[in-house]
Image (cartoon, helix red, strand yellow):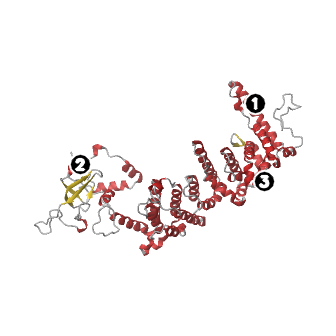
Amino acid sequence: VHRAASLTDPVGDAMLVESHGGNSDWSSLLDFSHFERSVYVMQILDSLLRPATAMFSGLNPETTASLSKAMEEHAASFRINFTKSGGFAAVMRLFVESGNSDKVTRRRNRMGNACALRILKECFFSNDELSVEGQDLIESFADTSGFLKSLVCTVIDDDGITYNALFRVLSLVRMMLESGPIFIRSFAALPGNLADTFLTSLLLWERVGSIGATGIQSTVKVRKTTGDMILAIPLLSSFTLPWLVKALKTIDTNTDGSDEFFSVLLKLVNSVDPVGNEIQLKDLGASVCFKLASYPGRVDDAASTFNSTGVLCGCLKLLISLIEAGGNNFLIEGSPHILNTIDISPWSDEGTKLAEDKPLIDLMGAIFDGFISSSKSGASPICCDVDSRRLAFNAVASAAKACGGGRGYTILAKKINVIISNVAPSLRHKWGQKPVVDGNHNSRNTANYSGLKNQGCTCYMNSFLQQLFMMPDLRESLCSAELPSSLRSTGGSLAKGDALIGKKISLHWDSGQNYEAIVEGYNSDTDMHTISYFPIVPSQQVGQHNQVPHPDLHSLPRELSDEFILSAGRPGKET
């Protein structure tokens, strides 16, 4: 290659490529057996194809613009002559030969491969868009598989590849795959699972030592660029789904770079027909449950602080999607495995009717008892942060909804009532739940509030308000709105804190009965008061009592003092 003035043009073409021997001259210049010398030749080609116009930045603007334009025009002319004379084919041949060599050789040829990538991309693209000349080059390809293999191996066999080279590989791979189904099938058919290894490794890309802001941004960009490519090409997406399902089985649970992997996998799952892809979704259901079962129990709070829950959250999202898509169908294999692995008693054993939804019922128990709760005293649950706990509760709720005949809700309500009955009275009050006096746990809701209470001729208004409350947007707006202070009932100057000690109060229970009590103490650390109920004194009239006109044995207060958080209600009606 040399710069020569044209003998027929008095002005001269400073970037004309003269090759008297045709392709044979390029073969001697770019020879794999003399790879080091070929690297020097490619560096010269790279400088001619990509002129460094920045060298003129110190000149005045007019001169800079003139010289830059001339250099870019010369580079465009050189590119055309370089391609026509066989230079492009020679670089492509050298790059493919390097890709077919062993792993050690490919790593040794890192610099030459990076230079070849710059030249090839420059021949295909113009301003980051596939040029007309580039499209012609694609149509003239003789070794599609060889080129794709070399691109893939440049990434997966060299952990020291630069980000610039990596993004050039991604650009060239996407260019090839968008050129037609034949290129996608050639990519998918690469030997040794190269295609799925390439895509999964880029979706989970983590460069050792990339701890700076630039390194983190580049790492995220690699994952995002790969995900966008997969989702933008439908045929590629169909090949990728089983690859990602297989990769899920080996993904490290402690990795914190799995967001893009699970985002792509979730979109692929939601886009396929559950009936036509039943086998793949069953395999995914098993893989998700096997991965969840591999999570070790937390030893203490400190251990949970340093462990990423990205994979855990991703698996829970997939689990919810599978439950909504097929209920029991996709969890037949995975549900028993996760139950047995974490050693949780099956919820389905607690009723004969529950067997119809056994996979879902047992999965609810596994998530509720094994992930939301902790089976070891003093240990943090596996779902130890806000995101993972929210998703775990959503998974339980989705499974309960998918069960037929309300069976999921029935067993869930039963389990929750057991928890409520065993907590401290103050915690029950905080949850808005009734105390359980006789230990009888029925399926009736024990919440203090069920609808709106009739405050006197307000039944029609209550019905209307409850209908409005069924509108989700209105309900969320009402619940999130702050009550103006002008609408609050202050009830005058009410005593607070230890000023209430020794005062007589009236407590209105959900049963409609009132009980009088005296405040015996106050704990400033918990801001809670200890009260003691007055004894029930029989009245002189038959069937009447001073406090309770018609005693309800199930609602009578306990003999021991209970603790309640006192809050201001209507004047004289503190509860």
First of labels 1, 3 by sequence position? 1
* In the image: residue 5, left or right of residue 371: right
Find the distance from the CA under tag 2 to the CA under tag 3. 85 Å
Classify mark 2: helix, strand or loop. Answer: loop
Q: Position of residue 35 (x, y in %)?
A: 80, 47
Amino acid, disc 3:
Asp
Q: Position of residue 438 (x, y in %)?
A: 28, 69
Mark 2 = which residue?
496
* In the image: residue 288, left or right of residue 538: right
Amino acid, disc 2:
Lys
- Say which quadrant the C terminus sits in: bottom left
Find the distance from the CA under tag 1 to the CA under tag 3. 36 Å
Q: Residue at x 41, y 73 (%)?
A: 350
Question: Contact, CB < 8 Å: mark 1 with mark 2?
Answer: no
The one nearer the camera, 492 or 345, is: 345
> Which image quarter: residue 265?
bottom right
Mark 1 = which residue?
70
Task: Name the front one of labels 1 and 2.
Answer: 2
- Say which quadrant the N terminus sits in: top right
* Numbered tag placed on residue 143 in the rendering: 3
